[in-house]
Image (spheres, rainbow, N blue to C red):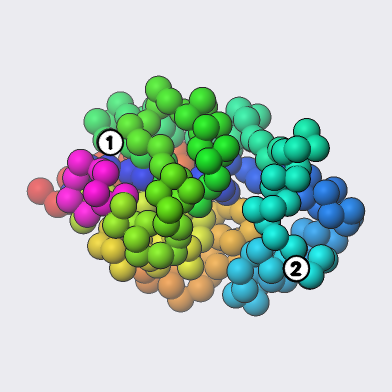
Amino acid sequence: MIRAVIFDVGECLVDETTEYGTWADWLGVPRHTFAAMFGAVIAQGRDYREVFQEFRPGFDLYEEREKRAAAGRPETFGEDDLYPDVRDALAALHADGLWLGIAGNQTVRAGRILRELFATDVDLIGTSDDWGAGKPDRAFFDRVAELVPAEVDEMLYVGDRIDNDVRPAAVAGMHTALVHRGPWATIQWNSEEARKLLTFRVESLLELSGLIRTFNESEH
């Protein structure tokens, strides 16, 4: 039985195309070059933050975020950056009586933006910076499990990455769903883990309501 659904942020709810484009601009790199290197790093199984090192060795992401903010160009996203299925999917799941949460590797500033966007739509919004623990560490998922009013095997974690989302959530005892969008899911979609590890594979978040309903009915 699934009673709670928890969503990752980047490339699950938020299309990060604009944000990564602004990082390319900040680095003074053509956007298509940055995107190509980004894909190469992910395909090699490396941490995405190594992309920045390829263009500027010694690059400190947190330090550069502060510099961007000081220059009046802070990281940001808004309603226009949400994937078009997000609002309707959340509404459908809420109507189904499911408890909803958002939890991802995000900064304190991003957490404030998420609360502005989703304060009335979900029951929990938490970030790695809020909790002092980030994915894929078990401590992050243990924190989710502590805050969600359901048993861990009644939770569904929805993300766009096998390595950061699905695998560690499954190890923590949660059900998992992979949404097919963004660079990670595009590269990892046909992997063995994507075929075997998941509770659900979806092209759109709108599929979740029906899939969860069918899953729960089969548990009776």
Q: Residue at the location (69% across, 53% down)?
A: 63
Task: Identify the residue shown where x is 52% and y is 27%.
Answer: 117
How dense is the environment of label 2, judged by Cα within 10 Å: few (below 14), some, or many (20 and up)?
A: few
Q: Nearer the viewer, mark 1 or mark 2?
A: 2
Closer to the camera in the image, 63 or 171: 63
Quick check: is 146 in the magenta stretch? yes
Residue stretch in magenta: 144-152
Q: Are marks 1 and 2 in contact (CB under 8 Å)?
A: no
| Drawn side of residue 3 relative to residue 5, left or right | left
Disc sitting over residue 58 in the figure: 2
Within the image, what quadrant is residue 166 found in?
Answer: bottom left
123 shown above or below 106:
above
Distance between the alpha carbons at the discs numbered 1 and 2:
42 Å
Q: Nearer the viewer, residue 185 or 203?
A: 185
Q: Position of residue 50 (x, y in %)?
A: 69, 68
Asked if 153 appears above or below 124 in the picture, the reply is below
Furthest residue in direction top, as rendered? 120
The percent position of residue 90, horizontal first and vertical second, equals: 41, 32
| Residue plotted at (50% across, 52% down) | 105
Residue nearer the viewer, 213 or 177: 177
Side (left or right) of 128 relative to 109: left
The amino acid pointed to by label 2 is Gly
Among numbered discs 1 and 2, the one appearing first in the sequence: 2
Q: Position of residue 123 (x, y in %)?
A: 33, 32
Query: Residue 130 is drawn in which quadrant?
Result: top left
Q: Secondary structure at mark 1?
A: strand
Q: Which residue type carries mark 1?
A: Trp
Tag of residue 99: 1
